[in-house]
Image (tube, rainbow, N blue to C red):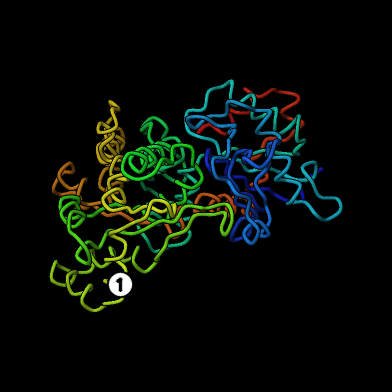
Amino acid sequence: MQPSTVVVLDNGGGLIKAGLGGEMDPTAIIPNCLYRPLSSKKWLHPSTTTAAVSDPIDLTSAAVRRPIDRGYLINPDLQRDIWAHLLSSLFHRPNTGPAHSALLLTEPLFALPSIQRATDELVFEDLGFAALYVADSPSLAHLYEASRRPMGLASKAQCSLVVDCGFSFTHAAPVFQNFTLNYAAKRIDLGGKALTNYLKELVSYRSVNVMDETFVMDDVKEKLCFVSLDVSRDLQIARKPGKENLLRCTYVLPDGVTHTRGFVKDPDEAQRYLSLTDGDGDQTANLGSDHPHVTEKLEDRKKTDLTKNEFDLTNERFLVPEMIFHPADLGMNQAGLAECIVRAVNSCHPYLHPLLYEREKELRPLVPDDYRVKITAQEDPILGVWRGGSLLASSPDFEAMCVTKAEYEELGSARCRQRFFH
């Protein structure tokens, strides 16, 4: 039986993005975990509906179980439960389901054979999919970027270097003609989880104990942290008092009564730092004088009342993401992102070097002067890989690329996996 639909599943350590091939956006984006709030004795699945937004569960100090650790599958049984719950929300019509569908699944680079076998068993034996194709994130991100900008360098040269900052690690992976060059890919064992933990330590030391608030501090990181374009300048600004400190902002913790989710107290205040990239110091200084109401609020927030479950952030907003460029500051004996990119490029053929180099602050001193350095941000870093998978799933060649359930049963996992080798 030929698969009637293709399910695209971007299975990250932090988030799962799932939907049907050919669509622009996934149907569901949920955390890849089970959680147990303090108010419950059972482990709960993250909701796949929009109703959870209007009536959210209080996740304060919630316990978490994750099937993926350090980027790799460690609990296949838990992953099966999460996938089964998620897939039940995707198949509504009669004669639809895994038995009538193919699965396009993302898998981290350098996955061990034992993990690959466990994944294949999940897909074919437990869930019963009719066919499977396994792809890596860098190649799908390159595919979507090349299709989105047909006149861009990635499309014309069919070559790019993809930096994939995930939940547990960061990869710098060269992609050539839609295939990831595994021999040149470099990994840093630092991702969003480590950055959240570092932010928890800083806030707990300076303000209020949030060491058990994983979901809350993830929200703080995603809403308030940013990569500084000039760390020395921003450190000086963070030391300034009152209205001159464009980096200070306040986050309100959930109280479990009036609100079950934390929030930024003044979103306009949190965005003032954006003016730092628009001009010189004089232009930045003028912003405060044009907004007297913001100045008044800042003066009030100098007297933050910790009994109100809120705290201020200043230099934490950019020092936490800065760790990805300087892992040694967290005690990790690893190269930073800029050095990782250069090593990945140098592992490729010299003819590819000018194309792969196409943030300038860190890379420029490490790159030969006759190479141009250019960085392109994805339209949506969260959905870019999934959209690349959706594009691939809708291509006429996709069916021939898949391994069918019959082939898996006849040849086994190891033989079938050879079809995915790049």
Left or right of 80? Residue 369 is left
Who's the residue at 30% across and 52% down the image? Answer: 227
Residue found farthest to the right: 94
User: Does 110 appear above or below 306?
Assistant: above
User: Does 247 appear above or below 422?
Assistant: below
Left or right of 325? Residue 370 is left
Which of the 4 image quarters holds residue 333?
top left
User: Does 387 appear above or below 46?
Assistant: below
On the question of residue 317 being in view, the answer is: yes
In-front residue for pair 89/242: 242
Which of the 4 image quarters holds residue 2?
top right
Specify the quadrant that holds the N terminus. top right
- Residue marked by disc 1: 294
Whole-percent x, y for residue 347 in the image = 30, 32
Left or right of 306? Residue 238 is left
Whole-percent x, y for residue 31 in the image = 58, 44
Residue type pointed to by label 1: Val
